[in-house]
Image: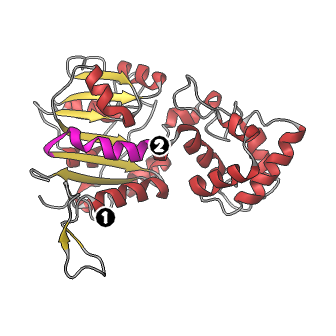
Amino acid sequence: MKDLDADILWGVFPVHPDMPDAHYHTPIMTKQVKACLQPAPGMLFLDGTAGGGGHTRLLAEAGAEVIALDQDPEALEACGRNLAGFESRVRLANSNFRNAADALASLGEARALNGVLLDIGVSSHQLDQAERGFSFQSEGPLDMRMAKSGGQTAADLLNNLPAKALEEIFTNFGEEPQARRIASHIVARRAQRPLQTTRDLAEAVLEVVPKRGPKHPATKVFQALRIAVNDELGALRQALQSIPPLLAPGARLAVITFHSLEDRIVKVFFREHSREWIDRPEWPRPKRNPDRQFHLLTPHPITPSEGEMQRNPRSRSAKLRVVEKLPHP
């Protein structure tokens, strides 16, 4: 089980020209993902974040069978259109990857998986849709829900939570240094008029933190709210705990993250479940790790090539980490 070498994995797998929604979401690091997961006929994969179906198609074109999940019904519709012709090898389910076991059971699938891919975060299409409220680039309602049925919106949080709770969201999920000042200003501003649109929020942040560089001061606040609305970190933690029992020996689990909060969770989980020995100062000698179930294939994360980052700027922060299930944990 040789560790994967990021240098030999750099490259871009072309978007298939006959995909009707080829630009719904540009899949990240497709050549690297294919090299890591090694899809082949007779194998069963789970794509936990189907998006527009780019990674799903990559696996299916290699002859593998794929179960693709997404909590956004619009994403699944695009995925279905993009995967026309692969119906015999691809099954779609409207589900968050945190509920992967339930989704597989609902499909009557009891086989162990040969690989899983999780591409964490928001899709390009969701960011570009003003009505979803994920971005301050265009005005839209403060929604930010990945699954638009039920649940609190960003507007609900901004207009109802106390300043301390908003501060904690901006700090914990956005690592925003001006979290306290921004939260206090939002509470004062909403007393005059509730925040309803992305422009309302962006302006509120600008009133506290003026723009001084290329990065918009509201970037971290928008990220933090999106994570809070969708419980993204909680979903990731739950998936990392629930997916390993679904894997066959030798199966690979690959996770693509886009910011340090996600990457830290994946890095720590993979490390704690792949190291053979653990040691503590009070112990006379190291002990075998009872939680070991993986071999770590990426001691350092795989990142996009310079060429991919130039073609798709949103890929710049992406990191890919991969583990392989041990035959005998």
Q: Residues within 10 Å of mark 2 (few under 14, many from 20)?
A: some
Q: CA distance from mark 2 to mark 1?
A: 21 Å
* Mark nearer the N terminus (2 vs 1): 2
- Seen in the picture, residue 246 relative to 150 is either above or below; the reply is below
What amino acid is at disc 1? His
Instruction: Please tell me which residue is depicted at 64% across the width and 46% down the height of the picture.
Output: 222
For residue 35, say whether it is visible: yes
Label 2: which residue?
Answer: 121
Labels 2 & 1 near each other (Cβ < 8 A) = no
Residue 41 left/right relative to 129: left
Say whether residue 12 is visible: no
Q: Which residues are magenta?
A: 235-250
Q: Position of residue 93 (x, y in %)?
A: 35, 22
Type of the residue with mark 2: Gly
Residue 150 is labelled as none
Q: Secondary structure at mark 2?
A: loop
Name the residue carrying label 1.
300
Task: Tell me if 14 is positioned left or right of 160 in this view.
Answer: left
Task: Give the prevailing secondary structure in the magenta stretch.
Answer: helix
Image quadrant in which you'd find residue 43: top left
**Quarter location, residue 236:** top left
Q: Residue placed at 49% from the left, 47% from the top?
A: 314
* Residue toward you, 212 or 180: 180
Q: Residues within 10 Å of mark 1 (few under 14, many from 20)?
A: some
